[in-house]
Image (spheres, helix red, strand yellow):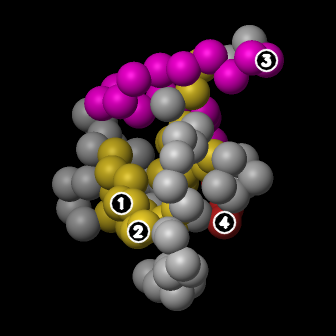
């Protein structure tokens, strides 16, 4: 697995987690922190849960999971409107 970049001043390491209810083959996290590009942040599977560690600056960040190529909200965090007609976490 890729190691996150060294923390910059003020950043915190956040772990995103997704536990699928059925078998899936790949999960990525995409958000404002990686230009909504899931391929930049693949998640690793431990047999139960997919996880990815990301270094983020303080504040609110929007994200979604990409599960087997389909965008999906995180069922465990609140939803927000992005101002463009989408709901993100």
Q: Where is residue 23 in the image (x, y as percent from the top left)?
A: 33, 44
**Most distant residue in the top direction:** 85
On residue 84, the disc is: 3
Q: Where is residue 81 in the image (x, y as percent from the top left)?
A: 62, 16
Residue 50 visible within the image: yes
- First of labels 3, 1 by sequence position: 1
The residue tagged 4 is 40
Main structural element of the magenta stretch: helix, strand or loop? loop
The residue tagged 1 is 15
The residue tagged 2 is 13
- First of labels 2, 4 by sequence position: 2
Is 79 contained in the magenta span?
yes
Do the residues bearing badges 2 and 4 touch, measured as CB atoms within 8 Å? Answer: no
Is 89 contained in the magenta span?
no
- First of labels 3, 2 by sequence position: 2
* Residue at (50, 69) in percent of width and height: 11
Q: Nearer the viewer, mark 1 or mark 4?
A: 1
Q: Distance between the residues labelled 1 and 2?
A: 7 Å
Residue numbers of the magenta segment: 69-84
Q: Considering the image in quadrants, where does the N terminus appear?
A: bottom left
Left or right of residue 74, residue 86 in this image: right
* Residue at (66, 65) in percent of width and height: 40
On residue 29, the disc is: none
Q: For mark 2, does the 10 Å Cα neighbourhood hold few (<14), some (14 to 19), or many (20 or more) residues?
A: some
Secondary structure state at the residue bearing disc 1:
strand
* Residue at (27, 44) in percent of width and height: 19
Q: For mark 3, does the 10 Å Cα neighbourhood hold few (<14), some (14 to 19), or many (20 or more) residues?
A: few
Work out whether residue 77 or residue 22 is closer to the camera in this orientation and state it. Answer: 77
Q: Where is residue 16 in the image (x, y as percent from the top left)?
A: 38, 53
């Amino acid at each position: 697995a890729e190691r996150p970049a060294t923390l910059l001043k003020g950043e915190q390491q956040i772990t995103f987690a997704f536990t699928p209810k059925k078998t899936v083959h790949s999960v990525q996290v995409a958000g404002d922190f990686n230009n909504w590009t899931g391929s930049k942040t693949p998640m690793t599977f431990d047999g139960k849960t997919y996880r990815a560690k990301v270094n983020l600056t303080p504040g609110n960040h929007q994200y979604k999971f990409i599960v087997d190529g389909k965008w999906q909200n995180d069922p465990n965090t609140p939803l927000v409107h992005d101002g463009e007609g989408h709901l993100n976490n």
